[in-house]
Amino acid sequence: MGHRDVGILHPGDMGASVAAQAVAGGAEVRWLPGGRSAATRRRAAGAGLLAAAGLRELTESCEVVLSVCPPAAALDVARQVARAGFRGVYVDANAVSPQLMARIAEVLAAGGATVVDGGITGPPPQEAGTTRLYLSGDAPAVARVAGLFTGTALAPFPLDGPIGRASALKLAFASYNKITYALAAQACALADGHGVLDELLDLAAGALPHTPLAATERLTGAGAKAWRWEPEMAEIARACAQAGLPSGFAEAAAETFRRWEAHKDDTTVTGARLIADLRTAERHEGPGTP
């Protein structure tokens, strides 16, 4: 077994880009093509990934397995890997709460794996200086994972301390960065409902020029990613509750993103349509609807 063999579960846009950086760092990266879409297969081929026949083959040939998937699937993916008998280093790089991260670690550790907590901030890594991978947990395992990405476009940032610290940092950053889009959309929908949207945009362009509030087209990316951001908001809400903080901000943002799920991966959706979708849902439900 090569000491730099890595498995990736499952290469969506972010996962494929992360895997490509491991390849750039000298690793052989394997994935599971069974049941995956043509788009996923194209991403995997473009990233230089090698196909594995099944999960057991992947876990037996790789000493490090990376999980990069929607947070709602993170625990199930961990359970599948544990059932396959994996005993290497498992990196959960999903947007999960510290509480869920601890549960994932229990599942994998029971089978003999070493778990590293990972938190990715920034876009899918393409160039240096844009994307970070925070890592916490077992120090030798953290160093090993960091070594996979040293010198690549995905900058590793080891954190002192236990599992949960990387996830907490990721969610704290996301709570500001992503809820900002929900707040901007809400403000625009409120202004639109009272006939002052143009005036709001003019005001924001002067007072807050670099924010999503200043131009509705900046909401487009949030609309396309809302299907992934909604479950992430649920994890943020749990993390807030665990810290004794109000969870309502994240819960409200989750509701906003839920109303945009029909625009999954649609980068052509307009900000005007997203604002209209918020108001359409409001009209259907009516004020005060339980």
Image (spheres, rainbow, N blue to C red):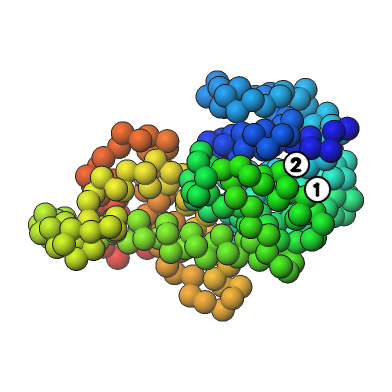
Q: Residues within 10 Å of mark 1 (few under 14, many from 20)?
A: many
Question: Is residue 20 or residue 70 the one in the foreground?
Answer: 20
Q: Residue at x 76, y 54 (%)?
A: 143
Q: Position of residue 284 (x, y in %)?
A: 27, 50
Q: Is residue 36 left or right of residue 256?
A: right
Q: Position of residue 62 (x, y in %)?
A: 81, 36
Which mark is drawn over residue 89? Answer: 1
Q: Is residue 89 left or right of residue 256?
A: right
Q: Is residue 141 above or below residue 251?
A: above
Q: Residue at x 87, y 54 (%)?
A: 110
Q: Is residue 232 left or right of residue 222?
A: right
SS for callout 1 = strand
Q: Which residue is mark 2?
A: 65
Q: Quadrant of residue 269?
A: top left
Q: Residue at x 71, y 43 (%)?
A: 148
Q: Residue at x 43, y 44 (%)?
A: 225
Whether residue 195 can be seen here: yes
Could you tell me the amino acid type at mark 2? Val
Could you tell me the amino acid type at mark 1? Val
